[in-house]
Structure formats: structure tokens, C-alpha cells
Image: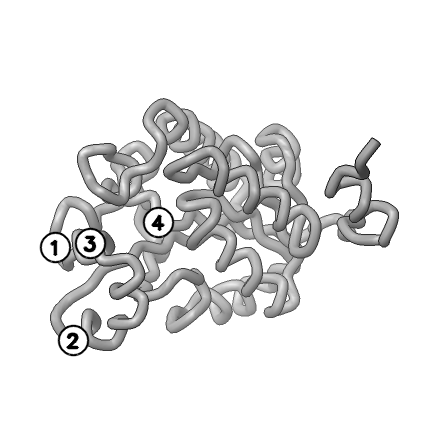
Amino acid sequence: MPVTAAELYRERGIGARQAPIRRPALVVVDLTYGFTDTDCALGCEAGQVDQAVEQVARLLAAARAAGVPRAFTRIEYDEASTAIAAPFLEKMPALRECAAGSRWAEIDKRVAPEPGEPVLRKLFASGFFGTDLAAFLAVHGRDGVVVTGATTSGCVRATVVDALQHGYRVLVPRDAVVDRASGPHEAALFDIQAKYGQVVDVSEAEAVLRA
């Protein structure tokens, strides 16, 4: 029988488990209406997106109760930043919908930030690139992040990769991330688990936040 990708990776020592996160932060990536409302061209898979938003709300409640730092990101463009992000927008012209002041750039009220929770504006995929996320985590003395939001194969994956490259361990709760299609979603989760972090159940991420 052919060897599966998962078996091949295990045989070659790829995909081992990272050490536990002791001082987590929660990062909510791009859960704006542009990604949670299927009326927008950017909208994620119907049905799945409501589940993801519900699970992110659950994790936010746990983090708030435990006093764990929380940060949000959102993509938002004005005239000047559209020019800066031109190569990205050439690949993803639908992102132009996330105009400053528009509904599509507004975080879904079901996971709305509370006072004191930073909302970091970004122009590209990673939540770290061109934002204060790295400084936020350093100031709070974190050693790992729980990454949630949209899209799994895009901004979530990019944020996970950069988190690792900044020296943080990463948890990705499977049901708290979402994409536009199941194929890219599953491929990204496989890739994250193999190389960059731990893909876990929401209950495991919640326990880490509460601890």
C-alpha cells in the first residue's frame, strides 16, 4: 500500500509535538464582516464560518476570565495603503472591499473587541508584518499564542509561520479557524501541524488559556 503523507512525515521526524505553552496570548485574525459574511466576495464557507465565530467567542471568554492578553487583527485599506499593498491586491483584488470605514473592515460584533484589547490594522497576510503584534507579545512576556480566525490557508497560516519565526509556540484550534473552501483549509492545517504548531481541539486550547 502507498505510504500516506502523514506516515511519511512521521517516519522522517516531521510533525513532532512542541513543548507546552505556559504564558499564552490569544490572537483573533481578521474576523471582520468581509470574511464572516458570505455576501462579500471574501466570505468564508457558509455554515463553517458561524461555527468558527462561535468557537472564537468561547476562547475569548476563557482568555478574558483568565486575564490572558488578547489581540485582534483586521485588513483595512485607504488610498495610500492600497498603493503600498499593490502586489497583494493584484493577487487578491477582492481585498479592496476592505476599505477603511466600510462594513467589510469591521470586526464581527459576535467577537467584538472590548476596551483595552488592541485591534491591529494590517495590509498583508501575517498579523506580525507591519503591526505591533510582536511588541504586544513581548511586553506581556508571552511564550506562545493561540491563533484563531480567517482564513486558514491565508492570514492564519501566515501569522502562525511568523509567530514561530518570532520564537513563539503556537496552538491552532481546528474549529476556531475557517476558510472559503475545505481543500485549502485542510491542507493548511496539515502544513501547520507538520511544521509550525499544534492543531488541537478547541477544548485543549481553552484549557491552556484558562491555566
Whether pointer 2 and pointer 4 mark residues with C-beta atoms closer than 8 Å, the reply is: no
Which residue is depicted at the point 47% across and 39% down? 177
Q: Residue furthest front?
A: 1
Residue 80 disc label: 2
In the depicted structure, whether residue 23 falls above or below residue 48: below
Q: Earlier in the sequence, mark 2 or mark 3?
A: 2
Q: Residues within 10 Å of mark 2 (few under 14, many from 20)?
A: few
Which residue is denoted by mark 1 in the rendering?
A: 101
The Cα atoms of the two marked residues, 3 and 1, are separated by 8 Å
Residue where numbered disc 4 is placed: 30
Residue, disc 3 = 98
Task: Tell me where residue 200 appears, x and y as whole percent.
Answer: 64, 36
Label 2 vs label 4: CA separation? 20 Å
Which sits in the foreground, 177 or 22? 177
Q: Residues within 10 Å of mark 3 (few under 14, many from 20)?
A: many
* Residue 124 in picture, x, y percent from top left: 35, 65
Q: Amino acid at mark 3?
A: Cys
Residue that appears at 41% across and 50% down: 29
| CA separation in Å, label 2 and label 1 | 14 Å
Which numbered disc, 4 or 3, marks the residue that appears first in the sequence? 4
Is 91 situated left or right of 208 in this image?
A: left
Label 2: element kind: helix
Q: Are marks 2 and 3 in contact (CB under 8 Å)?
A: no
Say which residue appears at 16% left-offset and 75% top-offset.
80
Nearer to the camera, 203 or 85: 85
Q: Of circles 2 and 1, which is in front?
A: 2
